[in-house]
């Protein structure tokens, strides 16, 4: 099977094998070794010396942890959004009582650093900026390095949903001054769902001291206290941690720069292949994501396309979310994937197109 959705992603056999290990005492010495080993390695992939927590939850839990550990009800939050996941992050802040100032961009366009600068200069009361690095719903990688530079100039907290980019795309937590970065095991990390990874800077700890949003499960004061003992406050997803330890080993063998490069090649090959079939890309080339490609479906039936690929070729792709349902389809190419996999995928899509009523646009020479 070719599972090509933007998470969960396929796991290498070694990773699945690692999950067969017997349970251990999560208050014992072996668990402490496992926890410290994984945490230190994940920090390397984040390019951070900040604290980092492994939480038992999906990516959204990590986003919630980022919000409740740094903010108080009534705090002004500049929420940037150009897609489904940008909206989600903003909704979490709102749910906990932040005063959310939403800066929206069309779905299919990148976030604009200039607009961020304008918003920050207009309202000195803003405490934090939240955004999505790689907007999985539209296949766009936002210009995070540029935006973070501006946020640092204005000295605001910067919380980043890097769920579908960290570990696959270039990401430099400390160099970019990112206070909280969030990702999850089932995306580029080649492990099953169950663990969110969240880095937390000194500035974030400073904010944490005054942060009054209600929290219990995700309280980082507790997380830190337990980490010092080699534990997590609550029972962790031990099997997913076994898997993650194994996938991190595979990632370390390949090397992070090679991983970034491989995703670049895979992304480029996907986009070129899609265009050569006569289809169009949803994202502007400059901001096209190397972990997920969104394809316009103006002249085809996405439901039929996805169905045919699933039934006839065992290839699983994703549709559009929310207002993009039926308007695009998405290919996840992150984690355990090579350019050869893209060949198989493109061939499948080519064969499927006639069954999806695809009408190639006429090209006039
Ligand atoms: C997958 C994803 C999430 C988290 O989704 P969960 O289902 O909670 O793991 C958040 N943001 C982005 C950008 C994602 O791709």
Image (cartoon, rainbow, N blue to C red):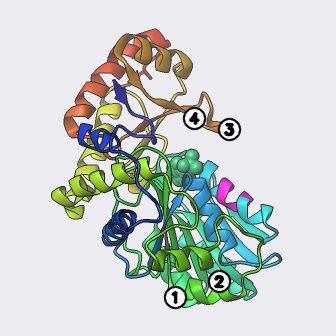
Task: State the quadrant of the N terminus.
Answer: top left
Name the N-terminal-most of marks 2 and 3: 2
Q: Quadrant of the C terminus?
A: top left
Q: Residues within 10 Å of mark 2 (few under 14, many from 20)?
A: many
Q: For the residue carrying disc 3, how many other residues have a C-alpha within 10 Å: few (<14), some (14-19), or many (20+)?
A: few
Residue bearing the label numbered 1: 202
Look at the numbered disc 2 and give the secondary structure of its residue: helix
Residue 293 placement, left or right of 337: right
Asked whether residue 108 is in view, the answer is no
Tag of residue 208: 2
101 left or right, relative to 327? right
Provide the residue designation for mark 3.
323
Q: Which residues are magenta?
A: 87-91
Task: Return the x and y of residue 226 as percentages of the image width and height.
Answer: 52, 75
Label for residue 120? none
Q: Are marks 3 and 4 in contact (CB under 8 Å)?
A: yes
Alpha carbons under labels 1 and 2: distance apart: 9 Å
Mark 2 to mark 3: distance in Å? 36 Å
* Ligand 1 under 8 Å from disc 3 Cβ: no
Q: Which residue is mark 4?
A: 320
Q: What kind of element bears circle 3?
A: helix
- Please give the name of the residue rendered at 41% of the width and 17% of the height, measured from the top-left corner: 309
Category of crowding for the residue at label 1, using alpha-carbon neighbours closer than 10 angstroms: few (below 14), some (14–19), many (at least 20): few
| x and y percentages locating residue 135 in the rendered image | 52, 53
User: Looking at the magenta stretch, what is its main secondary structure?
Assistant: helix
Q: Nearer the viewer, residue 354 or 67?
A: 67
In the image, 106 versus 249, the foreground residue is 249
Q: Position of residue 297 (x, y in %)?
A: 52, 28
When the figure is inspected, residue 27 is found, relative to residue 178, above or below; the finding is above
Residue 291 horizontal side relative to residue 319, left or right: left
Q: How far is mark 3 from mark 4, CA to CA?
A: 8 Å
Indicate if the residue with disc 2 has its beta carbon within 8 Å of ligand 1: no
């Amino acid at each position: 099977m070719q599972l090509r959705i933007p998470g969960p992603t396929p796991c290498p056999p070694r990773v699945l094998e690692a999950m067969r290990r017997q349970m251990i005492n999560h208050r014992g010495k072996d668990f402490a070794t496992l926890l410290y080993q994984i945490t230190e390695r994940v920090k390397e992939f984040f390019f951070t010396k900040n604290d980092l927590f492994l939480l038992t939850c999906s990516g959204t839990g990590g986003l919630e942890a980022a919000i409740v550990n740094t903010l108080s009800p009534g705090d002004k939050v500049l929420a940037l959004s150009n897609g489904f996941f940008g909206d989600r992050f903003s909704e979490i802040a709102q749910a906990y009582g932040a005063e959310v100032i939403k800066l929206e961009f069309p779905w299919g366009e990148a976030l604009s650093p200039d607009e961020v600068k304008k918003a920050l200069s207009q309202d000195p009361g803003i405490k934090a900026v939240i955004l999505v690095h790689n907007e999985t719903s539209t296949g766009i990688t936002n210009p995070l390095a540029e935006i973070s530079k501006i946020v640092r100039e204005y000295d605001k907290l910067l919380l980043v949903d890097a769920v579908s980019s960290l570990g696959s795309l270039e990401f430099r937590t400390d160099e970019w001054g990112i206070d909280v970065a969030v990702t999850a095991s089932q995306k580029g990390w080649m492990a099953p769902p169950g663990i969110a990874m969240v880095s937390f800077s000194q500035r974030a700890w400073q904010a944490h001291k005054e942060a009054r949003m209600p929290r219990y499960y995700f309280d980082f004061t507790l997380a830190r206290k337990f980490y010092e003992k080699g534990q997590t406050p609550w029972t962790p997803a031990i099997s997913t941690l076994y898997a993650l330890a194994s996938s991190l080993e595979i990632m370390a063998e390949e090397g992070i720069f090679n991983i970034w490069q491989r995703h670049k090649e895979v992304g480029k090959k996907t986009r070129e292949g899609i265009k050569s079939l006569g289809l169009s890309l949803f994202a502007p080339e400059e901001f096209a994501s190397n972990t997920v490609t969104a394809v316009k479906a103006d002249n085809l039936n996405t439901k039929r396309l996805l169905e045919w690929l699933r039934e006839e070729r065992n290839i699983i792709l994703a549709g559009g979310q929310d207002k993009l349902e039926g308007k695009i389809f998405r290919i996840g190419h992150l984690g355990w994937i090579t350019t050869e996999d893209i060949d198989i995928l493109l061939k499948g899509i080519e064969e499927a197109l006639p069954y999806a009523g695809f009408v190639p646009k006429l090209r006039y020479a």
